[in-house]
Image (cartoon, coloured by chain):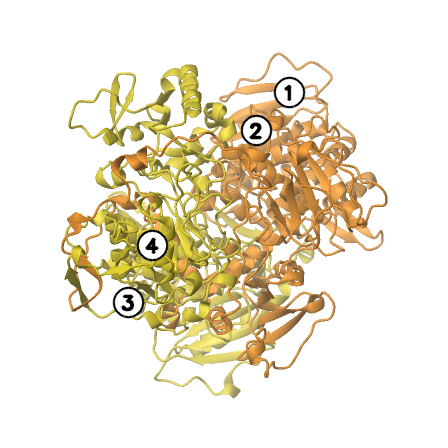
Amino acid sequence: MCASVKYNIRGPALIPRMKTKHRIYYITLFSIVLLGLIATGMFQFWPHSIESSSDWSVQKRSIRDVPVVRLPADSPVPERGDLSCRMHTCFDVYRCGFNPKNKIKVYIYSLKKYVDDAGVPVSSTISQEYNELLTAVADSDYYTEDIARACLFIPSIDLLNQNALRVKETAQALAQLSRWDRGTNHLLFNMLPGGPPDYNTALDVPRDRALLAGGGFSTWTYRQGYDVSIPVYSPLSAEVDLPEKGPGPRRYFLLSSQMALHPEYREELAALQARHGEAVLVLDKCTNLSEGIPAARKRCHKHQVFDYPQVLQEATFCVVLRGARLGQAVLSDVLRAGCIPVIIADSYILPFSEVLDWKRASVAVPEEKMSDVHSILQSIPQRQIEEMQRQKWGSVSNPLFLPLIPPQSQGFTAIVLTYDRVESLFRVITEVSKVPSLSKLLVVWNNQNKNPPEDSLWPKIRVPLKVVRTAENKLSNRFFPYDEIETEAVLAIDDDIIMLTSDELQFGYEVWREFPDRLVGYPGRLHLWDHEMSKWKYESEWTNEVSMVLTGAAFYHKYFNYLYTYKMPGDIKNWVDAHMNCEDIAMNFLVANVTGKAVIKVTPRKKFKCPECTAIDGLSLDQTHMVERSECINKFASVFGTMPLKVVEHRADPVLYKDDFPEKLKSFPNIGSL
Amino acid sequence: MQSWRRKSLWLALLASWLLILLGLFPLLRLAVPTSPRAGAPQGWPRWLDTELLQSFAKPGELLEDGPRPPQALRGGSCNWGACFDTSKCRGGGLKVFVYPAAGPVSETRRRILASVEGSRYHTLSAAEACLLLLLSPDTSTGERDPVPPQWDGGRNHLVLSLHPAPCPRTFQLGQAMVAEASPTVDTFRPGFDVALPLLPEAHPLRGGAPGQLRQHSPRPGVALLALAEDGGRWHVAGTDFSACPWDGRCEQDRGPKQTHPGATLPNATFCLIPGRGPDVLHFLQALQAGCIPVLLSPRWELPFSEVIDWTKAAIVADERLPLQVLTALQEMPLTRVLALRQQTQFLWDAYFSSVEKVIHTTLEIIQDRIFGPSAHPSLLWNSPPGAILALPTFSPSPSDFPFYHLQQGSRPLGRFSALIWGGALGQPPLKLIQAVAGSEHCAQILVLWSSEKPPPTRWPKTAVPLTVIDGHRKVSDRFFPYSAISTDAILSLDAHSSLSTSEVDFAFVVWQSFPERMVGFLTWSHFWDEARGGWGYTAKRTNEFSMVLTSAAFYHRYYHTLFTHALPKALRTLADEAPTCVDVLMNFLVASVTKLPPIKVPYGMWHQEARPPPLEPGGPGLRQEPQPAAQNCINQMAAGFGHMPLVSSRLRLDPVLFKDPVSVLRKKYRSLEKP
């Protein structure tokens, strides 16, 4: 898995006194900032491999011992932020030297205290939050101490809150960093940009080409594909534990919890509340709280007092209104409470918009439409609201999703798995070679103790015949993605399936073309739930339903060979090889799981080996075999964590099968009845 | 495994989704246990006195982010909230007025005008329009263009320009949005402007050339790379690309040069497209060819980037990293290659293959902005059949459409509504009603009474509700999205159809497996008639079919919405005039959406003998040979769609034990096999 994820799992050093959830927040924040950069195309091709960094422990020092740097009044100031910067113009990719073992390396400048000529500090040394963020980065595998190897540089100068720093002097401090070079490849973090009265939407500190991960960007200041928008951290969300809340109706339809709102907005909200009564709740600051209760944790409506942020969980929608700044800390609280944010902040660049689809979890309403917000939200159907509350991302995606009927001319490759039944094998080869669309025949010789017959002894057929010898007698050899397979369609066939006619096989291939993402086969089987034993049972009787086709005779897309060989979940592949059984059931599980679709059984054919055989062919005769097969189903269902097989009641026959119609005019007259 | 070690883009993205799945927002509550590492002291220090550190913001500072009066418009810069007046779009939704062309009109402009006029949003009245469309002139005459009459500072205007603007515009854009081909990222205003593709001169108005992808996976031995060259040509680099072909520094070994003449499509897995100006034309070629576009530091905004998730179909790479890009392409996992290839084809076909699609996509994007929360979810834009064919007015929930059940993990509702078209029949079809009502899956019966006679007052007693709807005596009425249809599935019937309960039951169970297709009993097949130089179709029994008759077929109710609201009016009128055409039209519609054939299920031949002759001459008869006039209909439909969407099938889905020589008692659908 990608570094960022693995990193989370491994869990790096925990500094004393630092709360785990804070850590996770900063780790995630940083990872997503990096992902944002990756999404812009800069690092798309970076090998995100994990270098197991050598164990290390940290230095323990006092914050009071930080060295002091005096900035002369005339020291250089960087250019203002370059709005035309893009990755390919302002980012120096060559510093991120390519090496398969490397990943993006991040350097953090050591902490210093900057003072001006008069000895007055230019900013607070470092805030709790910025220290935690840098600690998280330093603990990650991205971190390097070697400034020469670094691709990204993070100054330790704390820029999170513009109010807490002196703009010009801070810029001078940035400019004197040892690798500053116009800010190239420097990443700055800021959550509260601008200041009164204009409140710029991006950090005012001149920063030249430096990348900015900022809270509250607007479309005018955000450099798409260069900057990254981040959420404004809310200490409240981190401090209070809120229980998970499932989707469903809540007590209030719409809630506003922000305290310092512009009077015009407050009027609009009050009007909304007057119009819609109980459904809308507009909260404000509490005026008469008794001593000792933190005002930040309480909200009031008239004389009613509410706990904050808990009250957010009582509402379906929560308003996030622009204040002086576009980015509002309340957004973090609202999201965490599972309330759907209604964002009323024109031109606001939502956090991580490069990688997140905000439409699925929020509603944006133009400021001008604020008075209509209730009717806009009312028009959203309940089902969509629940989907937003779930904040669900990701789902089953069929790897062969494009509706497409491959050309007939491509043909198929037959793969016969054999051990030593040469006579039967030759019969199968001769029969299969009569199928018009066969383009190549591959024999997988699974017997290491015996050589395959000499070339001259093999049946002469009209298509190339190739024998592949395997290193070990394993069932999985039949599903190996051999280079020799040049067609998309593969016919897997056992060396004793002698009864399938050429018409049946050709028709099977035609059916596969119409369903190229499915297993299309002849022997149909079913799985059933055994209520007495409370487990799955394998069924090979002739029933009205099918959920599997055996790969003793089945067409499928060669991509599934790749999946079977390289992407089979859990230990299934080895388990099958060790038990020498159930590779066909495993393939059915694999295909059904990845496509979500049922198999197609073709033609009525039920006997495959000899006319006199019983319905259940040799393979599946005895009772122990049935028990083993049932065990396989239960084992696979537990590895997949679900039962992916789909039951259907249909099979595919030629259009005119058994119709009262001259046989000689039928395309596939020779379809056996059993 | 090497591929495991050297992870490229998709793994990173996968990881990002995983992160998101882990719950990006609830991450604060995640508590992953962590353990300290040991070793030599270095790195970022652990402060002994962290309690001295203060929060970055004072307690009140975050909560009381001082109020500020609503922002005034910034000069020159516009965004959707500030510069578009959606109040004009209330009621009728998006209504588009297009300024008529003055003077001689180029072919491309004529096509654009035709596309807008053919769209469901078009209006002839500038006063009722909420969007006014202005085509920017083909060539700058140097003169100041006259300001259009309803200009109003550009408010609610969209200035459409199919070519990137080389020179400054001749009039002030004011508050107008710009839909421009390949805009540079520097001037593009996301969420306000619309990025268009750069279309070649000869781009067809309608239909358009199909994608070139014939199979899901790349053919073995096909070249890995094609490199865009000047003049719309491609240099196929083969598999030997040790020399990075676009980088001047390693030009000495370019390998044998196979240059495709003219604008032929590249035959390779990946198509490298330099990010500068003229090469954007290559982008569409690559999409059409199913060659995965690898954009090297593009300076232009990708087309329709507001809604299309290009990470699913293209790769954006840094042109300064040739070796890394090549390595990553070579090692890209098969699954991702397959997914990217297929997505290029889907996007080409859904949004780019004709001028009409490009224009309709542009209008759809604006419509989505107006709809706000009820707009198309991203899934509908980025998976087949695409947002133009998935009307957001039908439902905001993807599970209500027939297309997204797999992605959503949902299933269509488990019952159906039978919709019986009365036609000119004066008698209630008693037998048919009984047979259909006998199905355990039947939720209700709707009779569409279109006869001049008043409907009978007495209807047979049935176990399910029976409702009579008064039709408008037009054939196309039968595909109207009546609000009474409460189920996902519709069983469309004619009064003179004949079906047994068993047939209905089995067909419905099959439909549940294929909710996006039509499942029918009687079929027609189309063919190319060399002699007449046109399409023809026949009801004769053949080994294949491409249409099912709507006189007895299951399909999703969404197709009624599409039929009524998305088809060009001209085609529906055509169907009303020649009633057999209505079957052809419905089959065309479903096939053009699904790109798949319909499904045939068994139908007892005894119905044929029992069936009375069709009462309505030329009406949708059962086994009737289409009349010459009807033969012409298929050609008019093909012209209207811009291509022939029908797809043939050679199979029929039967019950698993259908006509097997086993005891009939074992069979679930035994009455399907009446002799």
For marks 2 and 4, give the one nearer the viewer.
4
Q: Position of residue A45 (x, y in %)?
A: 45, 66
Three-letter amino acid code of the residue under disc 2: Ala
Three-letter amino acid code of the residue under disc 3: His
Q: Position of residue B545 (x, y in %)?
A: 66, 49
Q: Is residue A543 left or right of residue A428?
A: left
Residue bearing the label numbered 4: A30
Residue bearing the label numbered 2: B418
Q: Are marks 2 and 3 on the same chain?
A: no
For the residue pair A300 and B653, the one nearer the viewer reads as: A300
Three-letter amino acid code of the residue under disc 4: Phe
Whether residue B402 is situated above or below residue B215 in the rendered picture: above
Three-letter amino acid code of the residue under disc 1: Pro
Q: Which mark is residue B428?
A: 1
Q: Secondary structure at mark 2?
A: strand
For marks 1 and 2, give the one nearer the viewer.
2
Question: Gap between marks 1 and 2, in whole Å?
Answer: 14 Å
Residue bearing the label numbered 3: A579
Whether residue A543 is situated above or below residue A314 in the rendered picture: below
On-image quarter of the N terminus of chain A: bottom left
